[in-house]
Amino acid sequence: MKNIIKLNANNLSFLPKEVMVPKYNRSKIKTGIVHIGVGNFFRAHVAFYTDQLLNQGVTDWGICGIGLLEKDSKMNQALKMQDCYYSLILMEPEGTPKPRIIGSIIEYLFAPEDPEAALEKMADPEVKIVTLTITEGGYNYDSVTDQFNISEPLIQWDLQNAHYPKTVFGYLTQALKRRMDRGIPGLTILSCDNIQHNGDICKKMLITFINEAEPGLEDWVKIHVTFPNCMVDRITPITTTSDINKLKSRFGIADTWPVVCEPFIQWVIEDNFSNGRPEWDRTGVQFVDEVEPYERMKIRLLNTGHSLLGLSGSLLGYNTIDETVRDSVLVKLLRKFMDEEVTPVLGTIEGIDLEKYKESLIQRFANSNIKDHLTRICAESSAKIPKFLLPTIQEQLERSGQVKIGAFIVASWCRYLELADTPGYNFEIQDVMKAELLQAVKASVDEDPLSFLKIKAVFGHLVHSKRFVHTYIEMINNLRNQRVNEFIRELII
């Protein structure tokens, strides 16, 4: 039986020799980055890259994590217990897991307990970058109107309670106002969420809020704050009790919230920083003039591929992504979608061999040591489908291209929702639009077969495309009336 060592600053020297620990003295590290929305992906990605940089002797780019939501109290407790250290476990497709200790998060603030501390941290002159992982839905963006949803209740709260904000927009606005009022230089706001043009959308949403909350701030922000677009990539599933127990039994490390991830990692960023930046390129990050081709490729192939496998795989009774790609029929469906519906609208991407990239995605999905649960993949599909899938469908419709599998993905989502809470399925629906989605799905069975497509906030004007509607109706009827695996076999012929 291994001696169990609690992960914290005092115990780093007692950890097994095969576990890499930070080489740097954190007392000498300054906080140059604030990150809002500390979760597994951020800890496997941005914090990992930054940890590598700090290991090279850099001292001015430590990270302060900030949790804005009440649910972030769990992360607050986990990190505080461990002096903000945590284990990152690289899961190779074969072989022993490789844990390393990450120390780049040098402090954490739980904003609901002390909003003033969070505001002051973002206004600190030493802080030059605010990074965000607030999920696709966190930008309060209406994809139909292409506008900020100013009527959202928490947004209205922030407009009335400037010093006690609850949303990222309220916090950023007041922190930037303090910087302006105090003559402190601006900063860079770097969205790391899976949204095409994430920096552009972040800027548009924040400026809209600022116009309502602090109109005199807009001109200063446009001059002193930049919003680079970026593309992020690393498959990072939810931490399970099994992950925690395996870390303890194999390596003797007691970590309340380790992170498991695949070996692959990529980050492509527009080199547009207003007040300096880390030399992340020393750790493998690509700085480019134009990110859009890379993010379009990743979102439409990887993220939409995840949705295809997650939704159809759930209907087939699978639980994790690696299980779905052990089904040769599903793999053929995925590859047919990539080749015939996505690739024709991607264009040329400098330095990328698309055929090799698509093959690498399937290999990554097949990593049996990454138990990426389909529940996570299917969660918040109302935010994912409009951004990941619909642009491909719309562009294919415009060029009279193929949309059959795109329609199948939409129909699979409808069927997934339809089967929720029914015997033998019991899918867990995690979506901010859950009530509206389930109501529309029920109506699509009982009243109007197009009621699901008529959810304008998700599908926009797609219901007005006769060709897509015809294909979608064919797909949903087949999913309801025959075995899913038999229908998929017909699709790939």
Image: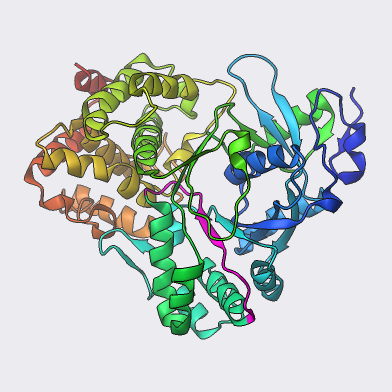
- 132 within the magenta span: no
Residue 432 can be seen in this image: no
Q: In the rendered image of this protein, does residue 14 appear above or below residue 434?
A: above
Residue 122 can be seen in this image: yes
Q: In the rendered image of this protein, does residue 424 appear above or below residue 231?
A: above
- 195 within the magenta span: yes
Q: Is residue 283 left or right of residue 320?
A: right
Viewer-side residue, 274 vs 321: 274
Quarter the C terminus occupies: top left
- Which residue is at 23% across, 59% downward? 456
Q: Is residue 12 left or right of residue 405?
A: right
- Which residue is at 92% across, 28% downward? 3
Residue 231 horizontal/vertical position (percent): 45, 42
Q: In the rendered image of this protein, does residue 352 appear above or below residue 25?
A: above
What range of the chain is rendered magenta? Answer: 182-196
Q: Is residue 394 left or right of residue 353?
A: left
Q: Main secondary structure of the magenta part?
A: loop
Residue 197 horizontal/vertical position (percent): 37, 51
Quarter the N terminus occupies: top right
Viewer-side residue, 190 vs 71: 190
Image quadrant in which you'd find residue 491 = top left
Image quadrant in which you'd find residue 311 = top left
Residue 187 horizontal/vertical position (percent): 57, 63
Q: In the rendered image of this protein, does residue 39 appear above or below residue 300?
A: below
Viewer-side residue, 455 vs 120: 120
Q: Is residue 25 left or right of residue 322?
A: right
Given the current orientation, which residue lies at the most extreme left position?
Answer: 466
Q: How is the image coloured?
A: rainbow
Image quadrant in which you'd find residue 475 = top left
- Which residue is at 26% across, 24% downward? 339
